[in-house]
Image (tube, rainbow, N blue to C red):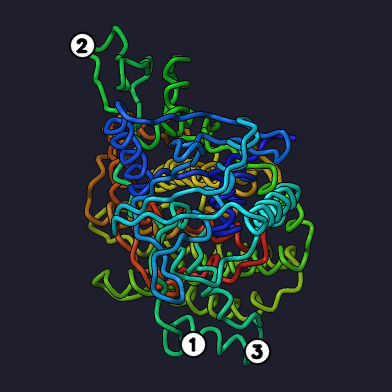
Amino acid sequence: MTALHVHSLHALAYCERLFYLEEVENLRVADARVYAGRRLHVEIEREEAEGEWLTLTLESSHWGIVGKVDCIRRRDGMLIPYEHKRGRSARNDSGEPDAWSSDRLQIIAYAALIGEHSGKAVNEGRIRYHADNVMVRVPIDGTAWRLLSEAVSRARELQASVVRPPVTENERLCVNCSLASVCLPEEARLAKSLDEGEDGPQKKRNDERMSGRNARSSPIRLFPADDDRRSLHVVTPGAHVGRKGDRIEVVPPKTVDSSPTLYPVQEIGQIVLHGFVQISTQALGFCSQQEVGVHWLTGGGRYLGSWNPGVGSVQRRIRQYKALTNSDLCLRLAKRLVEARVRGQLSFLLRTSRQSGHGKTADVDNAIAVIRQLLSPLLRANSIHSLRGYEGSIGAQYFKALPHLISDAAGDTMKPEGRSRRPPRDYGNALLSFAYALLLRDVMNAILVVGLDPSLGFYHQPRSQAPPLGLDLMELFRVPLVDLPIVASINRRQWDETADFQKAGQQVWLSDSGKKKLIAIYERRKSDQWKHPVIGYSLSYSRLLELEVRLLEKDFMGEGGLFARMRMR
């Protein structure tokens, strides 16, 4: 059995969920506090380099633990382990400095390692808290050995389980936790505070809470700030992507008279390769090390696949597979998903027709009326099959009305005629198809970062190269990230039918200039801020993609209730 690291026991005493995320699911995030702690140890090592200082990595076969002891000193013939902490000490009932429980367990484990390797009894450990400049002495006695034994046993028990421990009841621990952005403890507490019923009067009370009229105050945002890294799209056919030092190099084909371009890898979150673009194995390995996703699209804009270092742990995927065998859960998730998309479509039709300047047409009025009429039976659907039927009818009405949201000044040729996919048969559908491929790429990136399996979803069935879970999650974002900005760009007359499109018989594709223009519109839209109506904090659509996947994962593990609650205003 693999030895437990002493720092994992420290995490266990701090929060069992933290231990599980780090040691079982292999999730680690080094935040500012972690780096500050590392700097402290480096500074201490330099100061003590000339003194009585010894740092050792030791392993105990008896306890099954391994650890790097920061400092061992000899006092009155006894070996004493020392541990240095940046923060302040705890206080006992008398108000005197005391060790935090996690720090106490850590120094006891170090004492066990030293005692086993030296053959001498270790009777004391010492912890130095630098923030208040105090030294706390920890006796190594029978109580200490019992604490260590119980901690090792509990750690082994958690390692053998696929069930993630619940969120800690001590909310203060979460504020300083490096994995709060993955654990989402505040969101889990909010979901737990909402009643679980979703029908009748109970649903009405839930909706009132979610709208803020009856809800508790919004949770503290522990989800990470917006990612400033950008997506690098390589569109030029024949271009080559490679690595040069700590930068990504894009080399144009020999037929193009331009120099290679260098991009610092710290500024890149994803690389998207369109059509005939090559990437070196060195660049792929570098992207894996730097957690940069790589995605492939065909020249026509069809999503092909992804390479992402965010591989999910087996525990996360076992929970996903088990949850998706629950037909009731799949139906609940599918209802929420479809309702979110339909309400988004309805809101878009209402808002855009009011802003168009010439009022709603009969077709838009009729589509709105039919969608409203179908929404109620959709929410009462008792199977996913019937749910798909209602969604298909609503979708037909929506795409029938979509051309009437485009102003006459933009020209009739830019108006999509229904929905034609492969291949698109008009300019409007060419824009929609390409943008939906960009959206699928972003959704896939979020799924892989979170560590779920995209090949198994709860609504769409495997029927094409597109992974079902990716198609599921796309439904939440089609209107705000694709339909809305594309209609707006057409109404602003941003498109040149000659320069931005290519026609081949009845097929219409975007040219290279058209692709670049649409990519810019889409990426700009992703950076827009949006306030979540339930959770209460604002974040970019780019970050919202990952949040929704993490909220879905909570549904898979029984902490759900917040997935697909987003609504477009």
Sooner in the amino-acid sequence: mark 3 or mark 2: 3
Disc 3 versus disc 2: nearer the observer: 3
* Distance Cα–Cα, label 1 vs label 2: 61 Å
Q: Tell me the mark number nearer the camera, choosing from 1 and 2.
A: 1
Q: Is residue 480 left or right of residue 150?
A: left
Q: Which residue occupies 42% across, 89% down?
A: 213
- What quarter of the picture does the C terminus occupy? bottom left
Q: Position of residue 436 (x, y in %)?
A: 47, 46
Judge from the rendering whether residue 239 lies leftward or rightward of residue 344; answer left or right.
Answer: left
Q: Quadrant of residue 560?
A: bottom right
Residue projecting furthest to the bottom: 201
Residue 85 in percent (x, y) is at 38, 50
Name the outermost residue toward the top. 254
Crowd around label 2: few <14 · some 14–19 · many ≥20 (10 Å): few
For mark 2, give the secondary structure: loop
Residue 395 position in % (x across, y down): 55, 62
> Which of the pair 157/424 is nearer the observer?
157
| Secondary structure category for the residue under label 1 | helix
Q: Which of the 4 quarters of the picture holds residue 237?
A: top left
User: Which callout, 3 or 1, points to the residue nearer the camera?
Assistant: 1
Instruction: Say what amino acid the circle numbered 3 marks.
Output: Gly
Label 2 belongs to which residue? 257
What residue is disc 3 on? 200
**Relative to residue 430, is residue 334 depicted above or below?**
below
The residue at 25%/21% (across/down) is 262
Which residue is more in the foreground, 564 or 156? 156
Q: How many marks?
A: 3
**Residue found at x 31% / y 15%:** 244
Q: Which residue is mark 1?
A: 208
